[in-house]
Image: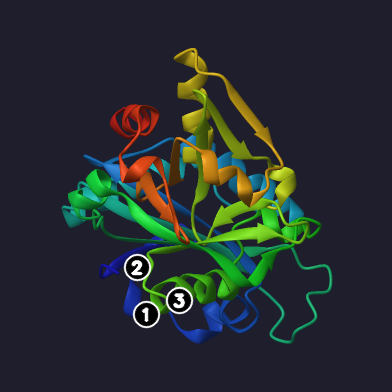
Amino acid sequence: MENRCIFDGKIVDCKTLTLDKLARGFLYGDGIFETLRADEYKIFRFSDYFERLLNNAEIVNLSVSFNKDKLQPMIENLLKSLKIPDAYIRLTIWRKQPESFDPLDERVSHYLVTVRRLAHLPPGLYKKGIHCILAKKFKKNEFSPVSNIKSLSFLENVLCRQQAYLSGFKETIFLNTSGFLAEASVSNIFFVKNGVLFTPSVSCGIVPGIIRKTVLRLAKSSGIETKEGKYNPSEIEKTEEVFLTNTLIGVLPVTQIDNIKINEEKIGRLTQLFSKNIFK
C-alpha cells in the first residue's frame, strides 16, 4: 500500500487510519470491495465496477456516499501525484456503525481507496499457462446471495488458494454444492469446445466479473458463439482451451486441471485472442 489513500472523500496519510474507523469491516467483514486497475493513469471500465458495487451494496443493505464522476478523477489524480501510472486499486466500503455486532437498520458506510503499483505476472505464465486443481474441501453455495458479491469475508477463497499452493498448483477451481463448475478462488473460468466459448452462469454461485463481462462482449463482437450454463467438471476432459479471467491477470491460460492436460498444454487460439485484446 502506498502512503496516501482516499478515506471518505479526503486524501489522507494511510497511517492515520485507526481501528475506530475500520472496526466493522475489520471485526465482522461487514462490507464489500472492488478491485480495479489503471493503465497509464486511466482506470479500466470504472463505470462497470461502480455499477456492480451499487448492486452489491443494495444486497448487503449499505448506502454508497460517493459519486463515480467525482471519485474517478480523484483517484486518477492521486495516481499522478504518486507517480503510479499502472496501478492496483482497491475500493472498500463497510458499515459505519454500531460498534456492537447487531447492525440494526444502519446503512451509512465508510469508504476507502488504496492504491499500489500493479505487479504483473511473469510473461512466461501467459505462454505456458498454469496448473489448477479442483477444490476438495470447499464448495460454492449457489443458493447464498453473498456468493455473487465481493464480500470482505474472503476467508474461504484464501483457504482455497492456499490449498492450491500446498498441493503444488497455482490455483483452485470451485465446484458448487450441486457439483457444477463455478469459479476459481479469485477468477472466473472459461473453456472452449468445438470453437464455442463456455462459462458457468451466475446461477452457479459465481461473482459476475467485469473481465468475464468484457470477454463475452469481445466474443460477441468477434462472431464467437458463447454459452452460459451449468457444466459438470467432466466437460473439461475433452475441452480445447481453458482460461481464467480477473482484473489483475486479464486472461490467463490454464494448461492442466488435476491430472488432465488441456490441449497437450498448448495455448489455444481464442485464449490468445482475448488475452491480446482484453484491455484495449
Which element type, helix, strand or loop, lies under badge 1? Answer: helix
Q: Which mark's residue is nearer the viewer, 1 or 3? A: 3
Which residue is at a point 29% across and 66% down the rendered structure image? 4
- Residue 209, percent across and down? 54, 44
**Residue indicated by mark 2:** 12
Which residue is at a point 75% across and 84% down the rendered structure image? 101
How far is the residue under mark 2 from the one under mark 1?
Answer: 7 Å
Question: Which quadrant of the rendered structure holds the C terminus?
Answer: top left
How far is the residue under mark 2 from the one under mark 3?
Answer: 33 Å
Q: How many residues crowd around disc 1 within 10 Å: few (fewer than 14), some, or many (20 or more)?
A: few
Q: Of residues 167 and 224, which is closer to you in this image?
A: 167
Q: Quadrant of residue 145?
A: bottom right
Left or right of 153 on screen, residue 214 = left
Amino acid on which the number 3 mark rests in the picture: Gln
Amino acid on which the number 1 mark rests in the picture: Thr
Q: How many residues crowd around disc 3 within 10 Å: few (fewer than 14), some, or many (20 or more)?
A: some
Which element type, helix, strand or loop, lies under badge 3? Answer: helix
How far is the residue under mark 1 from the one under mark 3?
Answer: 32 Å
Q: Are marks 2 and 1 in contact (CB under 8 Å)?
A: yes
Dot 2 or dot 3: first in sequence order is 2
Q: Of residues 233 and 20, which is closer to you in this image?
A: 233
Left or right of 234 on screen, residue 43 = left
- Residue 191, percent across and down? 51, 38
Q: Of residues 134 and 190, which is closer to you in this image?
A: 134
Q: Which mark's residue is nearer the viewer, 2 or 3? A: 3
Dot 1 or dot 3: first in sequence order is 1
Question: Which quadrant of the rendered structure holds the N terminus?
Answer: bottom left
| Disc number for residue 16 | 1
**Residue indicated by mark 3:** 162
Amino acid on which the number 2 mark rests in the picture: Val
- Numbered label tally: 3
Residue 63 visible to the viewer: no
